[in-house]
Amino acid sequence: MRTQAFEHHEGAGSRPDRVVDSTRETAGRGRRGIPHAWWFAGCARPGLRVGALLVAATVGLGTVRAAKIPVPNGSFESPATEFVDIRLDSWQKTPKPDWFDESGGQLWDQLTGLYLNLPVGDPGRIENCDGNQAVWIFAVPQAGFFQDYESTDWSSTSPLHAFDVRYEAGKSYQLTVGVLGGGGNMQAGASLLVELYYRDGSSNQVSVAASTFVYAPPPVPGAKRFVDVTVEVPTVPAGAPWAGQHIGIRLLSTIDPSLAGGFWDVDNVRLEAVGEPVLLAPGFFDGKFGFTLQSAPGAKFEILAASDASLPLSNWTSLATLTSATGSIAFKDESPTVDRRFYRARQVE
């Protein structure tokens, strides 16, 4: 969470004569929790000097609303197939390692591909498949695929530049992928890496966060269903090496060679970003105190006020409910002037 402190002093009717902005970075929080931003304002009366102070806090009371980031062909519906297809639109397959021998007839390119889910009623159908298709990844070391701004696919040797999304300072990220193990008599202990990365100046893929899914046979066989595997990136500090860099997504078989065999089913790649809400630009406008609320686009907030910040939430007064359609919205307190007032912006459903 980022905590910012702004202090200004002014005579009634004058502009601020001093502005101090002190910013400190604290450990990034998870994406869950309702963010609260707090302000204290000593409101203007004739002849009085005025101060305003912002303090921000985070209270885990619910779920933060996230902004969905489109992932090209994240549901693997393209190209459409009536059975199977080793072509993957928008995703680049990992290169064939030197040790992989294709002389036996199996090609590296065949270790990943997409397929049509089986019809309703078929025991092999995956019940929660998103759309009509999913992909397979053979449980062979280094088999997999990835996507970023510089990646290609089967149809082009030039970068596609389709996934044009960057890590933004002040935002946290969550990657979610549906994974199902056990295909083709997969052995217990087989592993699949789900990763978010960026490319450094030499175009190397540098991991930002990753989760490893390890296959364990179910005690009782049942309907086939994908299990969501998530990767969390805490709030990106402004000075992080990945801040401002393009986001990359990689799915990679990390199986031990002694366990090789079988295949993974993968589907529904989803990416979300959560922006920490921040209160900015405090000041008096036409004699009324106001500020700008910056957050993830589409977030809805209730503005609360109280004369004592230690009061329980139930004793705070609701002033307005705002929807930050673009990610930034102004608020001005139109209520009668008081000696001092604390403000809180609470995200609501």
Image (cartoon, rainbow, N blue to C red):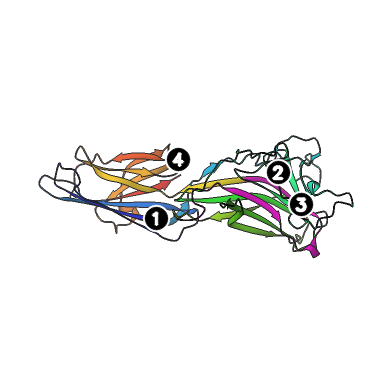
Q: Residue 83: tell me if it is visible.
A: yes
Question: Element type at marker 2?
Answer: loop
Question: Element type at marker 1?
Answer: strand
> Of the residues shown, which amino acid type is indicated by label 3?
Lys
Mark 4 or mark 3, earlier in chain: 3
Tag on residue 297? 4
Residue 53, horizontal then vertical, whole percent: 26, 53
Return the residue at label 3.
Answer: 96
Residue mark closest to the camera, 4 vs 3: 3
- Residue 221 in the image: above or below residue 289: below
> Of the residues shown, which amino acid type is indicated by label 1?
Arg
- Residues at badges 1 and 2 in contact (C-beta under 8 Å)? no
Residue mark closest to the camera, 4 vs 1: 1
Mark 1 or mark 2, earlier in chain: 1
Return the residue at label 1.
Answer: 2
Mark 2 or mark 3, earlier in chain: 3
Question: Element type at marker 4?
Answer: loop
Looking at the picture, tell me which residue is in the foreground, 2 or 321.
Answer: 2
Residue at image location 37% in from the left, 48% down from the top: 278
> Of the residues shown, which amino acid type is indicated by label 2?
Cys
- Residues at badges 1 and 3 in contact (C-beta under 8 Å)? no
Residue at image location 38% in from the left, 52% down from the top: 36
- Spatial CA span between label 4 and label 1: 18 Å
Residue at image location 61% in from the left, 57% down from the top: 210
Magenta highlight on residue 225: no
Residue 118, horizontal then vertical, whole percent: 79, 41
- Determine the residue located farthest toward the right in the rendered image: 104
Q: Residues within 10 Å of mark 3 (few under 14, many from 20)?
A: some
